[in-house]
Amino acid sequence: MRSISKIHLLVLTIILSAIGASAQDARLRFDDLAGLEKNASEIVEVNVDGKLLQLAKRVLLKVKDQDAKKIGKAIEGLEGVYVRSFNFENDNEYNIADVDGIRKQLSAPGWEKLARVRSKKDNQKIDVYMMFRGQDISGLAVILSEKKQIALINVIGPIDIDTLAELGGKMNIPEISISKDDDPDDK
Amino acid sequence: MKEDYLWDKKGSDPEIEKLENVLRTFRHKEQEALLLATQTIAFDNRSKPGNAPRRLFSFGFASVACLAVAIFGVALLQMMRSGDSEVAKKESVNKIENLTTNTDAENHATSTQPTTTNFENIETRVRNSGSEHERITSARKLINRVSRTRKSPKIFAKVNSSRETEDHEVVLTKEEKYAYDQLMLGLSITSSNLKIVRDKANGIREIAMPKKVGS
C-alpha cells in the first residue's frame, strides 16, 4: 500500500514538473544584458506575472470601459509579460551581439518566427516569434532594434495579438513611438 | 370526697387516691419534659448557630436587590425614552428647518432626486398650511411618514455617490495601481511593436510569413 502511494506520488511529481517545464518553455531569460545596460541612457524593465498580473487583471475587471473589456478579454489567459527596453543617446551605441543570447534562446524548438521586418531607412529590425500549444499561442517574443533603441518583449500565455495591436493608444495603453524618426503611419 | 385533698393534697381521700393510683402511668413527669425540651433547643443552637438570622438577612438582601434592580431598570427605560424623544425632536426640528430654509441645496442634489422630490412636496404642503404651529405639526407628520417609507436623503446620497464612483472612478490600492501600470506599460510596448509589424505587413514590405500561417 505504501509502495503504491509512493509510485503515485512520483508519477504526480513527474507530471507536475513536466507541466511546469512546458509552461516555462516560452519564458526567455533576460540575464545577460549587461552590455546594453551599460551604454543605455534609459532603461525600461517590466516584469508582470503571478500575483501582480492577477491584480492588474482585477483592475481591468473593475474598470467599466469597452476598451478595458477588450484588453481584459485579449489577455484573459496571459501568464506573464516581460519587457526590456534600452534607449541610447547616440546612433548605434550598442553592440547587436548583446542580443545574440536572446536570439539563441529563440532558436530552440517550439519557437517559430512569425514576422521579420527590415527597414533600411531607420535601420529598423523587428523579429516576432511565437510558440504554439496546439492551436493556441503559448508565447510571444519580439526583438526590436533601431538606431537608438533596443526592445525585448516576452509574453507568456495565449493572447489576442490583433486586439492588442488595435488597442495601442487607447485606454491607458499609450501608443509609444518606437522610432522617433519613423513615418507617421508607423506610429 | 374531700375537697382539700383535691386542691392542695392535704389530708387523705381514699377514693381519689385510688383513682390516682389507677391513672399513675399517665402522671405528668415535669423533670423529663424539661430535659427533653432543653436538649432539643440545645441541639439546634449548637449545630446551626445564627442560622435563622442569616436566612432572614439573605431574604432581605435579595428583596432589596430585586427592588433596586427594578427601580434602576425603570429609571433607565424612562431615560432612554426621554433621550429618544429628545433626538427625535431635534431631528424633526432640523428637518423642518432644512425644509423651510435650505431647500435649494436639496434641489441641486441630483443624486438624491427621489427623496428630494418627496421633501419638496412636503415643503409645498407645509407652506400651504395655516399657522406656524400647524405647519410644524403637519411637517412632522409628513416627515415621519416619509422617513418611515424611505431612507434618509443623506444615506441615499451616500449610496448614490458610491454608485457614481463605481461607474466613473475606480478606487485602486497602491499595489493595484502599480500592477495595472506595469501591465499597461508592458502591453503598450508590445502592442506598439505589433502594430508596426502589422502596418508594415499591410504595406507589403519586407515580411517573412511564418511557416504555420503561410502553409
Image (tube, rainbow, N blue to C red):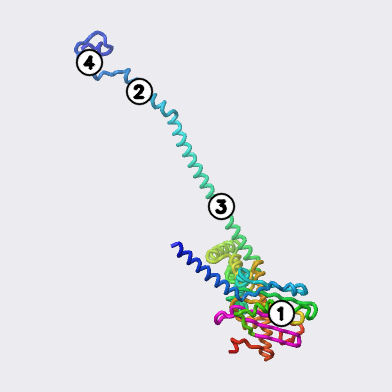
- Density class for disc 3 (Cα within 10 Å; few <14, some 14-19, many ≥20) is few
Q: Which is in the foreground here, disc 2 or disc 1?
A: 1
Q: Are marks 4 and 2 in contact (CB under 8 Å)?
A: no
**Labels 1 and 4 share a subunit:** no
Q: Which residue is mark 2?
A: B37
The reply to whether residue B87 is in sight is: yes
User: Where does the magenta region start and end?
Assistant: A115-143
Q: Earlier in the sequence, mark 3 or mark 4?
A: 4
**Labels 3 and 4 share a subunit:** yes
Query: Identity of the amino acid at label 3?
Result: Ser
* Residue A41 place in picture, x, y as percent: 78, 74
Query: Identity of the amino acid at label 2?
Result: Ala
- Density class for disc 1 (Cα within 10 Å; few <14, some 14-19, many ≥20) is some
**Labels 4 and 2 share a subunit:** yes
Kind of element beneath mark 4 = helix
The N terminus of chain A is located in which quarter?
bottom left
Q: Which is in the foreground here, disc 4 or disc 2?
A: 2
Secondary structure character of the magenta stretch overall: strand
Q: Are marks 3 and 4 in contact (CB under 8 Å)?
A: no
The residues bearing labels 4 and 2 have C-alpha atoms spaced at a distance of 26 Å
Kind of element beneath mark 2 = helix
Q: Which residue is mark 4?
A: B20
Q: Which residue is mark 3?
A: B82
Q: Residue at x 63, y 65 (%)?
A: B100
Q: Which mark is residue B211?
A: none
